[in-house]
Image (tube, helix red, strand yellow):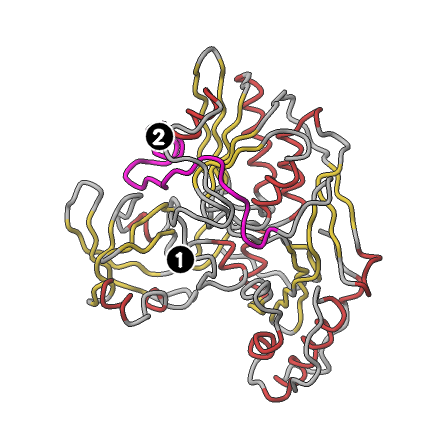
Amino acid sequence: MVRHANALAATLCLCTATLAAAQTRPASCNVTDQNLFVRSQLLNLYLWRIPLVVDPARFDSPQGYLDAVRRLPNDARFSYVTSAAASTAFYSDSQFIGFGFSSREEPGAVVILQVFPDSPAADAGLERGARVEDIDGRSVADLAASGELAAAWGPSVEGVSVSVAFRTPDGRARRATMVKRPVTIPTVSHTGVFTADSRRIGYLHFRNFVRPSVAALDDAFAGFAEAGIDELILDLRYNGGGLVDVAQHLGGLIGGSLTQGQVFASSVHNANNTSLDKTLRFTATAGLRLSRLTVIATQATASASELIINGLRPFMPVAVIGDRTYGKPVGQYLIEFCDKVLAPVSFSMVNAHGEGDYFDGLPVTCSAPDDASRPLGDPAEASLAEALHYVRTGACRSLPSLPTGEATGNGPPRVRAAVGWLSVLNAH
């Protein structure tokens, strides 16, 4: 069951500790007072200045006011207002209301990329590589052409249902009805160990940086230590980020004694909040002695996922296989008010060398497609096959690395349709 917490307070989300400065509340929960509260928090915490001439009383929701004053293009989607209960369920319990799948759009179909276990999508028979061609009697081609495809899946409300016609990976036509309910995302969905040239290569598919991730990561790395891995392939292809302290923990597990006590990342606030600037150091170790890291990424790889890449690069080579990442070098505080959460961009993140500001994403080393025709973790899947080749040879097997600013187009558009924690989720 989705857990409903009474107080989210203020959490560091990229998203750490309670922020005392944000403990004020609106005068009341009418719309104008909520909008005025959002304005006061932005004036204090927002990384950039907001236009003072915009009247909060003109807007019918806090989100509407926020959209009117946000800093473009850098903050097209990052700051948001959402339900406190939904945000807490996701970050605290790795849960959301939905069907339990992620996908990408292709001409005439929605291609399923992953399905979470014990979800409505799993019950309906969807699996990686399935092609949804019809939603509630309307073709995907028609929905896409009219701009209605994203809305066709309905709101994130328990009980919402859709009927889908799809083809299984082996081409069989099927139809099923799915009804939204609480779905739990296994944060570590797959681990494995491959052997190549007398080296043992660990593989970890990691979905999101939320509270349950810590124990799952500890278990995974204990297994890697027992297996004696020499190399690690970290699959972050659908990981939209999450909590900074979970990224800090994972960074320490990867860096081990090489990074312990070193600077993982530093937060940089606006000129009025330099007292909030914080330096995070690598802590946790897993007994591994890795000298480099290979990451599988797409344009859905964002935020805390990018922080792992950027934070480790001063201490070891980090190769990116697949596609250029999304580009979110900033973070938010989660501030609860009324029944909502405000998450304004409040700081940028830089590594030990002061490097950050990657709004165009982190460049790819070797490009490769996200091969939905094969299961995740299959060594023949295109991105994993390219990663394994790179680990063995230090070179790209297929397409050359891309110049800065280019992308292969394997991932979703850089400006996402989803907002807030839903954009971190990368799923329906």
The secondary structure that dominates the magenta segment is loop
Tag 2: amino acid: Asp
Question: How many other residues sit within 10 Å of disc 2, few (<14), some (14-19) or many (≥20)?
Answer: few
Question: How many other residues sit within 10 Å of disc 1, few (<14), some (14-19) or many (≥20)?
Answer: many
Residue at x-position 62% and y-position 52%: 329
Of tags 2 and 1, the one toward the viewer is: 2
Residue at x-position 42% and y-position 38%: 367
SS category of the residue bearing label 2: loop
Q: Quadrant of residue 343?
A: bottom right
Q: In this image, 10 relative to 155: left or right?
A: right
Q: In this image, 230 relative to 108: left or right?
A: right
User: Would you name the residue on which mark 2 appears?
Assistant: 378
Label number found at residue 127: none
Tag 1: amino acid: His
Q: Quadrant of residue 281?
A: top right
Residue at x-position 62% and y-position 36%: 250
SS category of the residue bearing label 1: loop
Decide whether residue 134 is among the magenta residues.
no
User: Would you name the residue on which mark 1 appears?
Assistant: 428
Q: Which residues are magenta?
A: 358-384
- Residue 216, horizontal then vertical, whole percent: 55, 36
Cβ atoms at labels 2 and 1 below 8 Å apart: no
- Residue 133, horizontal then vertical, whole percent: 21, 57
Residue sitting at the far top: 198
Earlier along the polypeptide chain: callout 2 or callout 1? 2
Residue sitting at the far bottom: 58
Q: Nearer the viewer, residue 123 or 68?
A: 68
Residue sitting at the far front: 403
